Image: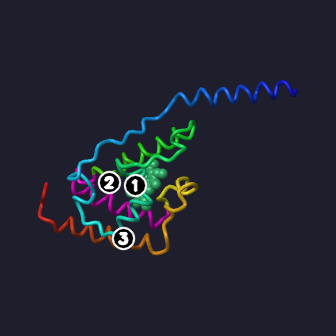
Amino acid sequence: MKKALKIGALALAAAFVVLQFFQIDRTNPPVNAVEMLEAAVEVPPDIKIILGRSCNDCHSNTTIYPWYASVQPSAWYVKDHIDDGRRHLNFSVFNTYPLAKKQKKLSEMCEQVRSAEMPLPSYLWIHGDAKMQPGEAEAVCDWTNAAIAALANAPAAE
Ligand code: HEC
């Protein structure tokens, strides 16, 4: 019995070591200033701080990879969230979205923070500082509402 446990533990340790050979691609795609969120709508400093702190790692091409993105199997989990997050909403290419999509994404941002679905709860286990503070969800919603209206009133730029 004792021997079986030892062999089991060794096998697990070996599997963990082998897994480390599978690293994720941690290079960020390039960023072009004219494609960014800031090029599409005005982003006041307080909102920029919230988005940068709580959303940027999964919703932009300027991800700062945490240490556990270098360790398997958690790196795959991280990579999955970043790929999926960028696919749904990417601040770095926001200005390439058609008008209707821009407005829809802004309105979803408000919904997601108001319902506390974003930032993803699992992200907050380690990034405690990314937690939304009282009043911040409302600040984001005030901003998204204003930005949606500004986009609607802007002379067609596309
Ligand atoms: C740890 C990664 C992560 C963080 C941090 C994060 N998101 Fe997300 N977000 C995702 C993923 C993954 C999805 C797609 C799957 C889903 O909807 O759960 C997503 C989806 C979204 C969507 C699209 C919903 C839809 O229906 O298409 C919006 C809007 C969004 N996030 C806003 C935010 C905002 C705003 C923040 C910051 C306050 C934030 N997210 C922080 C990972 C993240």
Q: CA distance from mark 2 to mark 3?
A: 16 Å
Query: Considering depth in this image, is 89 or 64 the residue closer to the camera?
Result: 64
Which label number is shown at residue 76?
A: none
Query: Which amino acid, by three-letter code, is at mark 2?
Result: Phe
Mark toward the start of the polypeptide (1 vs 3): 3
Q: Kindly identify the residue that appears in the image at 32 percent across and 70 percent down.
A: 143
- Disc 1 within 8 angstroms of ligand 1 (CB): yes
- Disc 3 within 8 angstroms of ligand 1 (CB): no
Which residues fall within the magenta stretch? 94-116
State the quadrant of the N terminus.
top right
The number of callouts visible is 3
Q: Classify the position of ligand 1 by quadrant: top left, top right, bottom left or bottom right.
A: bottom left
Neighbour tally class for label 3: few under 14, some 14-19, many 20 plus, Cα within 10 Å:
few
Q: Kindly identify the residue that appears in the image at 36 percent across and 49 percent down.
A: 62
Query: Which amino acid, by three-letter code, is at mark 1?
Result: Asn
Disc 2 is placed on an element classified as: helix
Is residue 97 left or right of 142 when viewed as pictured? left
Seen in the picture, residue 158 relative to 132 is either above or below; the reply is: above
Provide residue 56's location: percent of width, then percent of height: 40, 55
Query: Which amino acid, by three-letter code, is at mark 3?
Result: Asp
Which residue lies under the disc numbered 1?
56
Disc 3 is placed on an element classified as: helix
Which residue lies under the disc numbered 2?
91
**Of labels 2 and 3, the one closer to you:** 3
Provide residue 9's location: percent of width, then percent of height: 75, 30
* Badge 2 vs badge 3, beta-carbon distance below 8 Å: no
Mark toward the start of the polypeptide (1 vs 2): 1
Provide residue 119's location: percent of width, then percent of height: 47, 58
Q: Kindly identify the residue that appears in the image at 51 percent across and 64 percent down.
A: 131
* Badge 1 vs badge 3, beta-carbon distance below 8 Å: no
Which residue lies under the disc numbered 3?
46
Q: Kindly identify the residue that appears in the image at 63 percent across and 31 percent down.
A: 16
